[in-house]
Image: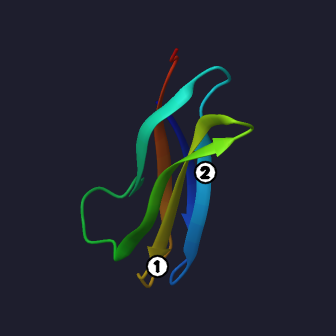
Amino acid sequence: MVEATFAVAAGGFVRDTVSCPSGKKVLGGGAQVVGEGTANFHTVIQELTVGTVGGTTNVFLAAVQNNDTKSHTIGIFATCAFTS
């Protein structure tokens, strides 16, 4: 499992990726608000997908809209594994 975090401003939008280590492929992934517990953060996931870079499936992309009046930190994570 790999994760990267991104700040998204109030009313802002983030679309970014997290990459698997060399030689591993993405099996799946997701995105969430991190470090704030459980609540309605007024965020909307607009896109979640496995991506291909350099001919291998090694990134996971997420796009999140923040409809809140305060900024949030978004974690994008991917499950990675060696595959044949």
Residue drawn at point x = 33 percent, y = 71 percent: 41
Residue bearing the label numbered 1: 70
Label 1: element kind: loop
Disc 1 residue type (three-letter): Lys
13 lies above or below 48: below
Residue drawn at point x = 36 percent, y = 58 percent: 36
In front: label 2 or label 1: 2
Disc 2 residue type (three-letter): Thr
Residue bearing the label numbered 2: 17
Q: Position of residue 43 (x, y in %)?
A: 38, 73
Residue drawn at point x = 58 percent, y = 47 percent: 51
Residue drawn at point x = 61 percent, y = 58 percent: 16
Between 42 and 84, which is closer to the camera in this rendering?
84
Q: CA distance from mark 2 to mark 1?
A: 23 Å
Q: Position of residue 7 (x, y in %)?
A: 58, 63
Q: Position of residue 78 (x, y in %)?
A: 48, 38
